[in-house]
Image (cartoon, rainbow, N blue to C red):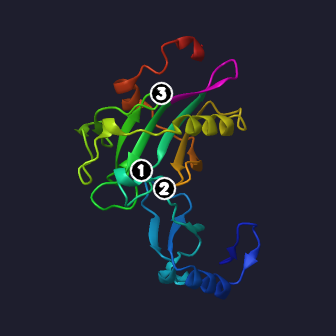
Amino acid sequence: MNNFYNADFEVVEADKVMEFLDDYKDTIVVKQEFGWGGKEVRVIHSTEFAPEQLRRNNNYIIQPFIKQHKVLNELYPHSVNTFRVVTFQKKDGTIEVLFTMLRFGVDGIKVDNLTSGGQCIYLDPSGKAAKFGYDYWGLQTGEQHKNTGYRFADLEIPMFHKIGDACIRSHQKYPYLRFIGWDVCLHESGEPKLIEWNTDGPSLTWEDALFGPFFPDDSEFE
């Protein structure tokens, strides 16, 4: 239908959208619906946007570029570095965090997705970062960020518990799902912001092999 909608799902005329973006004068993110691995994400200045850039018969989200916490900016400033938090609903209905990974971009890329060249580090339940980083295949990439030199073991997230708590609260709203992989960013204010969820392959394979077992009690699946 080629319509634009605001956050309240009200139709907005295209010329009003262009007027707003021209006045906004800041970085925005244009994300195509059902994109995969950050391949359909564009990070541009608001004045560079034009409606004809959008493909027909596709839906998009246009939103401000998130200003992340200074610790994550020091790790790598060119992408929003997100936490992948996998939550699991046990047979008794309680929900727990299985594991948390922090993903980040490298070499100037603007997304942190592993499938697009990003890397990650594992965070234990207390928030302590592992010594080594890893790539998409679960292979070690070194003890520090290849571009910024930030040593992974030095990473401290003082509000780490808030991230897991936010994911557990959100999972409680969907009791019919046992696994959810949450993508969470940490705003510059220190508050976690849920970006999206993943229920189709939330990622468990090499993570469990390296840092598990996450299911030492098989009775959860009997």
Across and down, in percent, residue 209 comes to 36, 24
The alpha-carbon separation of the residues under discs 2 and 3 comes to 21 Å
Residue behind mark 3: 126
Q: Is residue 60 visible?
A: yes
Q: Amino acid at mark 3?
A: Ser
Residue 93: numbered disc: none
The residue at the point 47 percent across, 21 percent down is: 214
Element type where label 1 sits in the image: helix
Q: Amino acid at mark 2?
A: Gln
Element type where label 3 sits in the image: loop
Q: Quadrant of residue 134?
A: top left
The alpha-carbon separation of the residues under discs 1 and 2 comes to 7 Å
The residue at the point 63 percent across, 39 percent down is: 166
Instruction: Decide which of 90, 63 is in the foreground and name it.
Output: 63
Residue behind mark 2: 68
Mark before the other along the chain sequence, 2 or 3: 2
Residue behind mark 1: 72
Contact, CB < 8 Å: mark 1 with mark 2?
A: yes
Instruction: Decide which of 94, 190 is in the foreground and name it.
Output: 190
**Image quarter of the N terminus:** bottom right
